[in-house]
Image: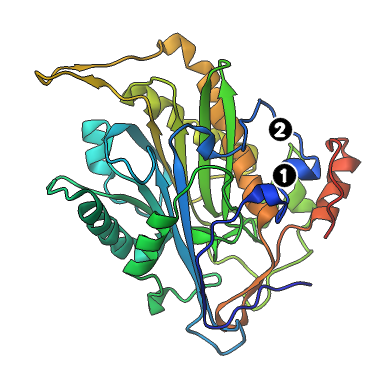
Amino acid sequence: MRFVLCSALISFLFVSTSEGAKPRARDLGIPFDGKPGKWNAITDVPGVEVGHVSVVSGRGVKGEMHTARTGVTLVFPLGRNAYEGVPGAWAALNANGDVTGVSWLEESGMLEGPVGMTNTQSLGLVRDSLAEWVHEKYHTNDEGLLPIVGETDDSWLNDLYSFHVKKSHVFKAAENAKSGPVPEGSVGAGTGTVAYGFKAGIGTASRIVKDSYHLGVLVQANYGQRQDLRIAGIPIGKQLLNELLPVENPAPRRDGSIVVVLATDAPLLPHQLKRVVKRVALGMARNGSLGRNTSGEFFVGFSTSRPIKSADGIQTWKSLSNNQLDLFFEAAIQVTEEAIINSLVAAEDSRGINGSQYLALPHARLKSLLAKYHRLESSKPFGR
């Protein structure tokens, strides 16, 4: 087995997945519907940028409690050098968790600034730090600035109550934000997260819709129980129920949560975006999610197509008709399904607080199971 062991290390990560550092689900031959964009990432939506900071310290040995396996991930709808509201919406499946700023998003239909992700006990700090970063960068005195930040409980591997995430990490994640391929797995807000009893983290995927529009998601996956996991329609979790089990914390204490950010460049009104965002839950269901009582599933979506503002304060909106939304519903389901699997495929075996160990989804074993059910496409030779 391989474990990621880091001591007194804070890593600021934004590396290109195109360099082959980590395989993705399609590299293993897992079949997915729909046509992905150039990077098969949320950044295929023009203007969108993503920044990560991973906070890692401690050896991950038994008795060591102040271990850091956590971080921050930021999604900028129009890039970090632009500050302008965009049409937005949010939804929740089972709301056992928190996302700041969504009350005003629901009321106004506009998303202002980046969307953040972090751990549960760093939610307030990341929210405040984002407000400060926006104020300093854009010299805005907008009293209505209410940053949107979601959280998941990464205490599977991370010591939540050592409050490892600092303002400097948030600022660094903002300055790191880029377009292009997005790092996945144990990075940023996904550094300490677990899904379906395996190490998980950040995942992303995209689709081209109606030949000209893009729709993508980025997920912070930290939920689900082993027996529920389905990949390509196959009950993989049941096949691996007694294999590669966690160490020191063998039974899931709860389901955990997931935060999903959805982006599109299609001209959609806020109420239409809400309809699209709600379909994220159906993508989760394809992978076996039940939305259990102890889980929190939060979805935030936006369109980079903004209304045109005139000098007299009149806004002119452009939108697709409701009859054209079915393809966007389908794309939202497809990208969510794939992004979650990408988060599992890219993750690595990890040790954390008090010696807890979570193993990554085994690539070779997964491929053999999918081949058994004739659900494996041609793939590159990855094995683990």
How many neighbours does mark 1 have within 10 angstroms: few (below 14), some (14-19), or many (20 or more)? many
Query: In terms of secondary structure, where does tag 2 sit?
Result: loop
Indicate the colouring scheme: rainbow
The residue shown at (85%, 56%) is 383
Residue 256, compared with residue 312, is above or below; it is below
Q: What amino acid type should be assigned to the residue bearing mark 2?
A: Phe
Which SS class for mark 1? helix
In the image, taking residue 62 as reference, residue 304 lies left or right, namely: left
Q: Nearer the viewer, residue 166 or 104?
A: 166
Q: Which tag, 1 or 2, sits closer to the chain's start?
A: 1
Asked whether residue 294 is in view, the answer is no
Residue on which the image places disc 1: 25
- Check if mark 1's residue and mark 2's residue have beta carbons within 8 Å: yes
**Percent coordinates x, y for residue 270 in the rendering:** 32, 26
User: Where's the N terminus, which quadrant?
Assistant: bottom right
Q: As shown in the figure, which amino acid type bears the numbered disc 1?
A: Ala
| Image vertical order of residue 315 relative to residue 21, above or below | above
Between 190 and 45, the residue placed more toward the observer is 45
Q: Position of residue 307 (x, y in %)?
A: 27, 21
Q: Position of residue 81 (x, y in %)?
A: 33, 44
Question: Which image quadrant is residue 330 in?
Answer: top right
**Does 249 sit left or right of 44 as displayed?**
right
* Viewer-proximal residue among 49 and 269: 49
Question: What residue is at 27 percent from the left and 57 percent from the top?
Answer: 133
Q: Can you identify the residue that label 2 sits on?
A: 32
Tell me if residue 89 can be seen. yes
Q: Residue 154: percent from the left, percent from the top? A: 50, 65
Q: Quadrant of residue 310?
A: top left
Quadrant showing the C terminus:
bottom right
What residue is drawn where x is 70% and y is 56%?
21
Cα distance in 3D space between marks 1 and 2: 9 Å
